[in-house]
Image: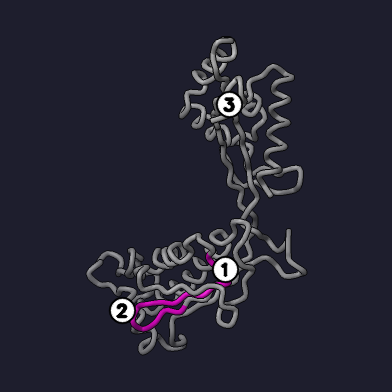
Amino acid sequence: RVTEAVYLVERMVDILAQKLGMDKAEIRARNFIKREQFPYTSAFGFEYDSGDYQTALDKVLAAVDYKALRAEQAAKRADPNCPTLMGIGLVSFTEVVGAGPSKMCDILGVGMFDSCEIRVHPTGSAIARMGTISTGQAHATTYAQIIATELGIPSEVIQVEEGDTSTAPYGLGTYGSRSTPVAGAAIAMAARKIHAKAKKIAAHLLEVSEGDLDWEIDRFNVKGDSTKHKTMKDICWAAYNNVPAGLEMGLEAVHYYDPPNFTFPFGIYLAVVDIDRATGETK
């Protein structure tokens, strides 16, 4: 869906460069949105939050020694005895992914949010459920690492369940490069709710106020005295038998994440092919 559109646009840019007598890299550089112009609103109303297209182009050209390639290409074309010609293809793209903000798109009236439910057990292990499904992207590894980073729980004790509509909170599934930007964000937000509750429990156990605690990897330390601390493993156990008055037992959370915007990944590709003058064979 994207490849075909990019091909048409890039061919038009190449043809324009030929008609203007410009190098294909130069015409792109002149027309890129500049880094200082972000956030940038496109003609279709999308707000590109960030990008640095010129730097991406510069890195590609430097990696292949573009000037030397152009010189070699010209030399081969000028030499009638050279058996091959050289072709240099250069393309750039910006994709709209991470669908998507409900204010901008929906499916039959249902917003394109995604969700996550995380439950942390007394033992310190956890289970996370979400509405996406891995089709080879290794979601379980990515999702477990998000939770591990947010909560200080080892990723190997985090069970990830996807795609079971009888247990997972409602989600819009896996497509359009949306799983990590949308479901991943829902996971992080659910984990932060648990983190906030864990901090209350840690303050209760250490008999200090929440403001007197610092977070460090997998534990809450009393400010100024890291020997006084409670690890997440300590807190997970306490969440089911020793919580402050007025706080529910347990350590779990659900979050529905409706992204405020799409994400806009970008890149530059350069390909070099040799073309046999006699047969047209390429390699």
Q: Foreground residue, 55 or 41?
A: 55
- Labels 2 & 3 near each other (Cβ < 8 A): no
What distance separates the C-alpha of mark 1 from that of mark 3?
A: 40 Å
- Residue that mark 2 sits on: 234
Secondary structure under tag 1 reads: loop
**Residue 39 found in image quarter:** top right
Identify the amino acid type marked 2: Asp
Q: Position of residue 198 (x, y in %)?
A: 40, 76
Q: From which residue to which does the magenta span run? A: 119-134
Q: Nearer the viewer, residue 252 or 111?
A: 111
Asked if labels 3 and 1 touch by Cβ distance under 8 angstroms, the answer is: no
Horizontal side of residue 168 vs 6, given as left or right: left
Across and down, in percent, residue 77 comes to: 59, 14
| Residue 10: image location, x then y, percent | 68, 34
Q: Nearer the viewer, mark 1 or mark 3?
A: 3
Q: Which mark is residue 132?
A: 1
Q: Which residue is mark 3?
A: 88
Residue at horizontal 65%, vertical 59%? 99
Tell which tag, 2 or 3, sits nearer the viewer. Answer: 3
2 or 1: tag closer to the N-terminus = 1
Q: Is residue 107 magenta?
A: no
The residues tagged by marks 2 and 3 sit, at their Cα atoms, a distance apart of 60 Å
Q: Earlier in the sequence, mark 2 or mark 3?
A: 3
Relative to 202, residue 146 above or below: above
Q: Position of residue 58 (x, y in %)?
A: 52, 29
* Mark 1 neighbour density, 10 Å: few (under 14) some (14–19) many (20 or more): many
